[in-house]
Image (cartoon, rainbow, N blue to C red):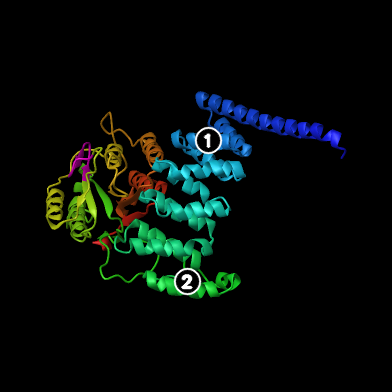
Amino acid sequence: MPRRFLPLSVFLFAFLVLMAAQALADKVDDAKKKLKAALDSGDESAAVEAVMELGNCNNAAAVKQLLVLALTTENPKILEAAKESLSACTGEEALTQLLKAVQSKDWRLRALTAGVLGGIDSSRARDAIVGLMSDKKPEVVREAILAAIRQDKAATFVDPLIRLLEREIKEQGLTWVAVRKALIALTGEDYEKPSDWKKAWATIKEETESDRRKKEKPAEKDGNGPGFKTKRKKSPPRFFGAEIYSKRVLFVIDVSSSMKIKEIPFIGESRLELVQMELAKCIKKLDKRARFNVIAFSNRVIPWQKTGPKSSLVPASSKNKRAAIKFVAALSPNGHTYTDEALESAFEESEADTIILLSDGAPYKPKEPREPLSQELMDSILKWVEINNRFRKVIIDTFGFESLAEDKDGKTALEFLKNLAAKTKGSFKGIKTEDW
């Protein structure tokens, strides 16, 4: 090209770049306007469409907007759309902006980013996930572990996961369980001790990828528990047969009038008496490193230790165990089933990572005598939990009596408990006669 045309070509190139940048900026602004209009009008479908448009912009401005939206929206569908769109922002500029969130002081943003990075096939994303495994906030660490499973890159994640297993071996709580699950998913092997994992992983790395893939991965077992076999000097506490691995647990127990019913008519103990005995055994077996609290509820909430901004969980010392068991033994059945208020109180406890909820009925807050069950109330509780648990990721394990399935209202109650557990990746346990 003759030298005299060089300045013109440079000018044209710069002009085209500027025009493209302006077009993309206009596209982001247009999507933001559509999103605002949709949110203002309450049009969920239009809001989701606008979110997807933002994701297609794939630049820093779009990532910023999507992160703000994901943190502030209380609509589950819009939140999922925002996370999906963020996972599609894989351009260099967009990914750089997303990775800045890893350093945020807001743990919710770090946890959100960890989940998003699980869907991005990039070495930069994987490096960030490994870094988040060392986060001080357990919720962030567990999101990073789930992201590692989604990435399914054993070569990247197994070594840091083994180091994390070493760190969690004394606690053996929910993070320990999550690490074990991740290592099983990534390797197809199952060991308990970090030293055994190190030896096994050294052997596995010598195998070819195709040979490793031929191995059958162990299947998850149904119900509560981590889904793997483990040999431990001390077995975890159980509640109606379900193992409890959490070291930050909150027991929420229904003491409404129906809990006076005898599971076996005319003989034996009432439902509440059975629960009192079972809960006493469970509390006695809590690990000394555990922290716990008990909340009873009917048409009022009765906490053993008052919930609030400061943690109400107390160490599982012998003295505290005796006091908690005494509180449980003094409970008596009365009133209706205000499950919504019990859960609101439970969520005020900022330290708990697991809620054990036992109830023998559906949520019930009648305004008139003999008022039928309200599906609207049950749906509103599920939605409230989904909104308030979108970052905390508290697990709610639910327990209900199988005998409830004998009538329509009982079936409704069991279905509600199952749905509540499913919303939080918890487990439902149907209590049968043989469980006591």
Helix, strand or loop at disc 2? helix
Question: Which label number is shown at residue 64?
Answer: 1
Estimate how packed mark 1 is, as few (under 14), some (14 to 19) or many (20 or more) residues with alpha carbons within 10 Å: some
- Residue 287 is left or right of residue 53, and the answer is left
Q: Residue at x 40, y 52 (%)?
A: 141
Position of residue 85 measured from the top left corner of the image (x, y, whole percent): 57, 41
Q: CA distance from mark 2 to mark 1?
A: 39 Å
Instruction: Answer whether residue 306 is magenta in the image.
Output: yes
Give coordinates of residue 173: x percent, y percent. 32, 58
Mark 1 residue element: helix
Q: Is residue 74 visible?
A: no
Q: Quadrant of the C terminus?
A: bottom left
Can you name the residue that lies furthest to the right here?
2
The amino acid on which the numbered mark 2 sits, given as a three-letter code, is: Trp
Residue at image coords 47%, 42%? 101
Q: Which residues are magenta?
A: 295-307
